[in-house]
Amino acid sequence: MLRSLKILNLSRSHCLVNSPDFSHLPNLEKLKLKDCVNLVGVHESIGELERLVLLNLRGCKNLRKLPSEIVNLKSLEKLILSDCSMLDKLPPELGKMESLKVLHADGINQLSLNTGEVKPWHEHVWSWISRPKRSPECICFSLTSLPRSLLSLNLANCNLSGDGIPKDLGTLSSLQSLNLSGNPICSLPGSLKGLTKLWDLVLDYCTMLQSLPELPMSLAGLSLNECRSLEMVANIPKLFYSLNLDMVGCEKLVEVKGLFKLEPIGNIDLEMINNLSLTELDSMGMLEVELFSNLAGRIIKRAPTLQVLYECGIYSIFLPGSEIPGWFDKKSRGSSMSFTVPSLPHLKFRGLNICVVYTRAIDFDQAEWSCECMKISNKTKGLKWAYCPIYKGMAYEDKDVIWLSDWKMIVNQLMEGGDEVNVYVNMAQLFQVKEFGIRILYDDQEEEEGTQNNTSYTCHQNVIDLSVYRMKESEYMLNNHDTIKRAMDYERISGAKWDCPEITGEREVEEGE
């Protein structure tokens, strides 16, 4: 009867010190020894289980080693060693287990391999070697020779540091899920983009991670929660289509290339500063305003200098103040304003500056945190743009905020003299609009034709692809911080309905084996 047994579950056998002899269980397919907290050894006969596909040793906190015979498990697909905190050795021939698809070794911070000789990189599938140097409590971790067949790899909380991650990650060509959460890594190699089948990358609580290289376009899930040192991400693939993105707590993130960048005003092109008439900022004293990141879900930590946000072809600056500057010729005490773009000889319409003064709402503490938005409608051409910035300046009871924005790149080719335009400002529930103003920008057409002007915002791209923001024909929701919320905000602002793109590739939920 035992010879026909396919599943053996000895999980939570707290009195089990050594596993039984498995030589009489030739047909065993699943072996579960989860949370056998006093288990110190696994019988060498485990190597005879030719049909074993699952071995779960999660939480065997006193297990110090695995028998070398484990490499004979030619059918093994899933090996779970999570939280085997005393495990200090793995068989060096692990890479020969060509059927292995899932390896979970999270929570093992003492793991090492004694291979006898140091083999060059190309002879191994992967070599992880972490050498923590800062703390004597940090214990070296080394995992060598992973099989190419791996689909899922979990090395969370394993004390992996950056120098332990090989440059050639692409060798694990079949990998679909990678979890490196809770490791003291500062960066990942550029070869990460070579994992062309990777659909789930989890880096939660990598608190020393400062930047991310280009990510593979195959990603369907990216989790960066509480990566508190992260400042730059090279790209976020499929953000507007199918990516499940979690970035709560990335309080230092100031750039995702191609999407947005927050930087000191001293780095910004002089033309934009002149457009917003901000050349006298040095004489205005302390101008910093606390910025809340809608992406991170908290106030960001930045140097006390005025910051400029570039996003969706729009520049935004948040300043302390309670009045619309005098150079804005169109002003309103309400939340909307309509005007006709003047047709002026020898002047070419160049764009709009919009200024909003807002204060903290009376019921701020009970208000729902939602998206602040500017909406521009060109009624003549039937075009609409709604912009929800990734950051917002925080207004307090005794401190109003001025939101200045420059819309040159979005509207300069989509408006012209004679167009009827409406501008609407919605500060959601947290804040209340006190006043807002509009300034129309022009180029002297004769001067432009006679001179070659190359100062057009050289620090950022001049051509903006709006297609990814299109909600329906001729209507755009410029929102980079949440694709689901982008559709919800569109409904709230426009009254129209929009079906959100389906989020696919849900993060793997480990079965309770």
Image (tube, helix red, strand yellow):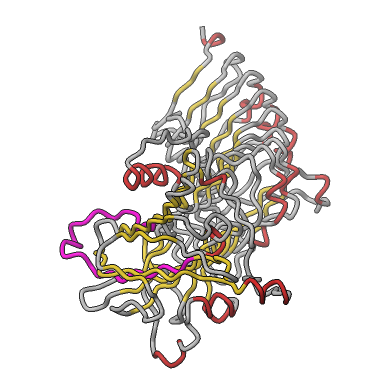
The residue positioned farthest toward the front in the image shown? 345
For the record, the magenta segment spans: 352-374
Q: Nearer the viewer, residue 113 or 216?
A: 216
The residue positioned farthest toward the top in the image shown? 1
Residue at image position (62%, 27%) is 77
Is residue 221 found inside the magenta-colored segment of the image?
Answer: no
The residue positioned farthest toward the bottom in the image shown? 283
Is 462 left, or right, of 158 in this rendering? right
Residue at image position (47%, 81%) is 277
Q: Nearer the viewer, residue 209 or 354?
A: 354
Is residue 361 found inside the magenta-colored segment of the image?
Answer: yes
Q: Position of residue 252 (x, y in %)?
A: 48, 67
Residue 138 visible in this rendered orientation of the protein: no
Residue 402 location, quadrant:
bottom left
Vertical comparison of 396 with 44: above or below? below
Q: Position of residue 321 (x, y in %)?
A: 31, 80
Q: Position of residue 161 (x, y in %)?
A: 61, 61
Q: Nearer the viewer, residue 214 or 511?
A: 214
Q: Position of residue 390 (x, y in %)?
A: 44, 59
Residue at image position (25%, 69%) is 434
Residue at image position (64%, 43%) is 217
Residue 332 location, quadrant:
bottom left
